[in-house]
Amino acid sequence: MTEPSALRLRDLTVSVGERLILDGVSLEVGRGEFVCLVGPNGGGKTTLLKAALGLVAPGAGAVEVLGRLPAEARRRVGYLPQRKAWSPGFPATAGELVLANLYGAWPWRVGGLARERARDVLGQVGAAHLVDEPLAGLSGGEVQRVFLARALVIDPPLLLLDEPTAGVDARGRGEFLALLAGLAGREDRSVVLVTHHLAAVRQLADRVAWLDGRLLAWGPPGEVVEGREGDPAFHAQDHDRPALCEED
Amino acid sequence: MDFLAEPLAHGFMRRALVAAMVLGGTGALLGVLVVQRGLAFLSDGLAHATFGGLALGLLLGTTAEGALWVALPFTVAVALAIGAVRRRARLSGDVATGVLFSFAFALGVLFLGLRPPREAVSVEGLLFGSILAISPSVLAAVLLVAAVAGGTLWLTWSRLAYATFDPELAELSGVRVARLEGVFLALTAVVVVVGVKTVGVILVGAFIVIPAATATLLGRSLATIGLLAAGLGVFGSAVGLLASYHLDVASGAAVIVTLAAVFFLTLVLRRR
């Protein structure tokens, strides 16, 4: 019996109030596949991820995650949100945040074994040294690494990453994308990355979805991105950069 | 020794001390989550809603003491309505609280006006409470509410904390955020109601917010802050109440002034 797709959308339509955000989007992300979602702001990329997480309900169509309904599959999906809602006044450390996702509850205290577990996962994203650090004191790039570790701690078969390099400087962005490249190519993990960085698309994606309310293009990066390199959907500084390593 | 022995020779002082310490600890622990959620106004709002509940009890013919048992469900209902309005209208907590508490307070004024003039009601007594006049039955209610609130907080603290950090991420990690939100609002409501019976509508918010704010200045983790806040709430309430006896000043105000003094002292020393 073949494994179900990591993510399958059939004629997905989502509206918020009177506004149609996604209009009849169909696509399928296979196991081990790395897919980039690109397109202009307001094109429905984040909404697509939230529909996959069961945080927004489809007006029409269907969403299937790892062969199940989105709400049923949540604990097997790693998610890195674009907008971090936490208040800087909340006394959270990186280790506590990572463990909270593992336990489904905020830890009373971080003891020896739990701390080692958090350190190991933070180590996968080059942030083991941050385990006891308060989140409020971290740089934008460090926060993104900690949130990526938070997503990875449940060893999810599907990772949904919403603009993980937003607010990160060019050097940090290059390092972060190199980190994502390490996540690519694993047969047991699919990744859906929302990005405005052409370099990320070229380096990481097996397939690319161009969204602007509707799915305007869907296929290998060469086909989808070709002729669109100067599109405002991509950050200007990326237009002439062929690969991530040049950013380092 | 006289500082303790003399006041504790009186039964009313023993009851007041137990009520103040229990409420101080429970309110402060709950206050940590109230402060972290940016809902400091919630406890004041629910205190004003409690006035509406007490007035409804009097309208229904209860005694001033018995009105507590009407105010409890009434204030819980207002608290849950605040949560529902917040979600449905996507309003901030303070706006939803502002709408609901003034509505409940106005209802209270109407209820008192509609009440047949059987016996005089001290509106001042409703607004300011009187911890020294606390009866054994009200003390029992305070202890019951504190036990329920403390036990529920103990069981739900980790999930409430996660939902306080980020409700969406907590939901994705399996926390039933909407249900917990209802539990949190109901807990705040019942603690506020028994607080109103002791220190009154005007001062009860301070019981919840000030020790939590002080502990937030000192603690590094949420659990530490919770324990510190509970300790400060118990300590400040006891010292304030005993001081009020010896200085012959209003007890509720003395407790709040003590809690506030600890806060300002902490703020100044911490800056150094």
Image (tube, rainbow, N blue to C red):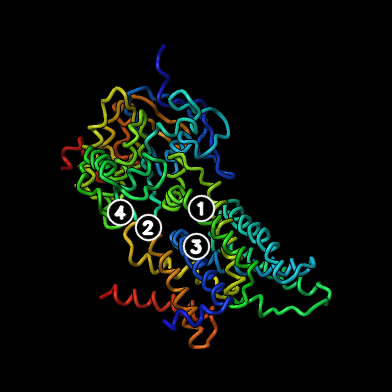
Mark sitting earlier along the chain (1/3) = 3
Q: Which mark is residue A90?
A: 2
Kindly identify which residue carries mark 1.
B151
Secondary-structure class at tag 4 = helix
Disc 3/disc 2 C-alpha distance (Å):
20 Å
Which residue shows up at 84% across the image and 74% down it?
B116
Disc 4/disc 2 C-alpha distance (Å):
9 Å
Check if mark 1 and mark 3 are on a common chain.
yes
Disc 2/disc 1 C-alpha distance (Å):
23 Å
Disc 1/disc 3 C-alpha distance (Å):
10 Å
Q: Which mark is residue B42?
A: none
Callout 4 amino acid = Leu
Callout 1 amino acid = Gly
Whether residue A60 is situated above or below residue B228 in the rendered picture: above
Q: Nearer the viewer, mark 2 or mark 1?
A: 1
Q: Chain of mark 3?
A: B
Q: Is residue B156 left or right of residue A246?
A: right
Q: Which mark is residue B26?
A: 3
- Residue A170 % position (x, y): 22, 47
Kindly identify which residue carries mark 4.
A135
- Residue B268 % position (x, y): 31, 77
Q: Nearer the viewer, mark 3 or mark 2?
A: 3
Secondary-structure class at tag 1 = helix
Instruction: Please rate how many residues cluster around mark 2, counting C-alpha atoms within 10 Å: few if below 14, some from 14 to 19, many from 20.
Output: many
